Image (cartoon, rainbow, N blue to C red):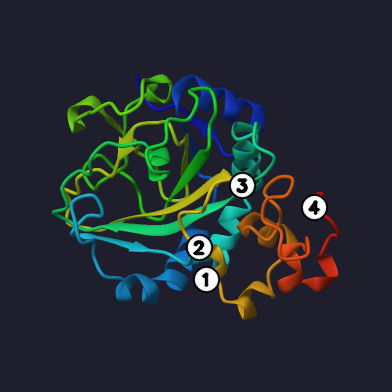
Amino acid sequence: MTIPHLQANARCEDVVATVEASGGVILDGAVSSEFMDQLAAELRPWIEKTPTGIDEFEGRRTRRTGGLIARSARCRELLMNPLVLGSANRILGRATSLQVNATQAITIAPGEPAQVIHRDQWAFDMYPFARDYQVIVNAIWAMTDFTARNGATRVVPGSHAFEDKLRFTEADTVPAEMTRGSVFLYPGTTYHGGGANRSDTNRTGISLSYSASWLRQEENQYLAVPLDIARTLPEELLRLMGYQRGAYALGYVDDLRDPMEFVRPDLAKRGMAR
């Protein structure tokens, strides 16, 4: 079984159906190479300052650069991509709303071995969610080409339907090979891991994940994005970052105030209703 590909102008319904059938989909050429040039220029100084990981899971030759909403206007555009965001909303449709879970530029350097195969939803303290209830959707955007040789994400196709806490090796996986500007979309139940980089160049992917709004975010957006920057962002992105109630009575401030009041008082809502 291979990872299916769709064109970037695919219908949202087809993207979701493909993810539900296969555990993931690659949308070819979702943004232009010129867009990725601009993104790379915005992130280059931040990536260069990022230390490598401290263990095998983080990757001792891998840099994980976060805080992308504050650091990159192009990353904000990727987060709000209509097809990706629309698909994520449908995949997580049993939750009242979704939120930004984490933002990372993941740069795998030559010589990095393959990452352990895992599920993204294990981040939530290995909680055994119901098998038919998705809580995370991840979009990995190719800032460089993704190849089997340079560390393309390794995936166990169809594994979104498997039992939890299984163990796999690199031999059980296939590479999510895609061209620069494409995006690999998959749910938190799909078993995957970063590939080994056996090339002589870096492989960089932009990982932008979304989660159900009743879960704690992996990356704390309220601290990662300073208020002076947050106040310049559009309402839709602010609410996606978490400046809204995640469901009835979840996330209000003191006297039932809307969290939006702290960044954009003009957009605040009264009471606990969203």
Mark 1 vs mark 2, CA separation in Å: 6 Å
CB atoms of marks 1 and 2 within 8 Å: yes
Reading the image, the residue beneath label 3 is: 213
Q: Which is more N-terminal, label 2 or label 3? A: 3
Front residue of this view, candidates 264 and 23: 264
Quadrant position of residue 77: bottom right
Mark 1 vs mark 3, CA separation in Å: 17 Å
Residue farthest front in this picture: 255
Q: In this view, does 217 lie above or below 63?
A: above
Q: Is residue 114 above or below residue 253?
A: above
Quadrant position of residue 2: top left
Q: Residue at x 74, y 45 (%)?
A: 248
CB atoms of marks 1 and 3 within 8 Å: no
Reading the image, the residue beneath label 4 is: 272
* Image mark for residue 223: 1
Task: Pinpoint residue 185: horizontal percent, then vertical percent.
Answer: 48, 38
Q: Which is more N-terminal, label 3 or label 1? A: 3
Q: Quadrant of the N terminus?
A: top left
Q: In this view, does 226 lie above or below 129?
A: below
Name the secondary structure under disc 2.
Answer: loop
* Label 1 CA crowd tier, 10 Å (few <14, some 14–19, many 20+): few
* Label 4 CA crowd tier, 10 Å (few <14, some 14–19, many 20+): some
Q: Nearer the viewer, mark 4 or mark 2?
A: 4
* Image mark for residue 220: 2
Q: Specify the amino acid type for callout 2.
A: Asn
In the rendered picture of this protein, how many numbered marks are placed on residues? 4
